[in-house]
Amino acid sequence: MILLAFDTAQGALSAAVHDGEGEIASAFEARTRGHAEALMPMVEVVLAEAALGFSDLDALAVTVGPGTFTGLRVGLAAARGIALARNLPLVGVTTLEAVAEPVAAEADEIILASFDARRDEVYMQAFSANHAPQTASLLVNLGDVAAHLSRGPFVLAGTGSELVAARLAAAGLDFRMAGCRPQPDATLVARIALRRLVEQGADAFRTAPAPLYIRAPDAKLPGGRDPGETA
């Protein structure tokens, strides 16, 4: 199965092509803006490197959040457009799942993925050592981080790790840093998506995934309305 995955949701841009056995081609760059202009050129580069075209794809995957409002819209719009045009299944993967995926943990450790959400808050989610979710994706005030967790020990991953570490230390909880890339990577998004396609089948992903908005968007329309608010 040939799968194209990409991520535009946080502070990076990445794309990867996977054939079910391993990665064929990938690209990654740190980027906080300009995802809309850079996404499709990057996709074209990784497809060319893999000697493939859109007609060769069997499935797609994209990150659905949490992340920036604009970044999420860019990635999801592109993924939905390609999926519709090629009649492909589209798998949504959260950014927290993606940063937790490469973390190697001991059986008694809890993987804690987090992103700096600004405003003294973090997006976070806890996973078992075998990457099974232990909590939902949460938006948590830094002062309340320890209250949402068990006793650990924890392995920290993601851009919020330093912030979370300070709170765990203050609460006397054991932790260590994972040492993995703190941004989502399409290579790992592809790996998660392929597992789901094998487990659930392509037909389970014929409906486009919805964005995971934990915090309401900051942008306002004239009159102070949110972009998603109806008149």
Image (tube, rainbow, N blue to C red):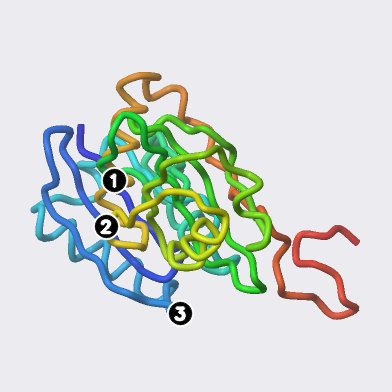
What separation in Å lies between label 1 and label 2 (alpha carbons)?
7 Å
Q: What is the x, y in percent for residue 28?
A: 25, 66
Pointer 2 residue: 180
Separation of residues labelled 3 and 1 (CA atoms): 27 Å
- Find disc 1 in the rendering and name its residue: 103
Residue on which disc 3 sits: 33
Specify few, some or many for label 3: CA neighbours under 10 Å numbering under 14, 14-19, or 20 or more. Answer: some
From the top left corner, tell me how far across and down residue 215 is, in percent. Answer: 69, 59
Judge by depth and name the residue closer to the eye, 46 or 192.
Answer: 192
Image x and y of residue 227, in percent: 75, 66
Q: Who comes first in sequence, dot 3 or dot 2?
A: 3
Query: Marks 1 and 2: CB-CB under 8 Å?
Result: yes
Residue lying at 63% horizontally and 44% vertically, measured from the top left: 148
Estimate the spatial distance between the alpha carbons at disc 3 and disc 2, rounded to whole Å. Answer: 23 Å
| Left or right: 200, with 24 as reference point | right
Q: Earlier in the sequence, mark 1 or mark 2?
A: 1
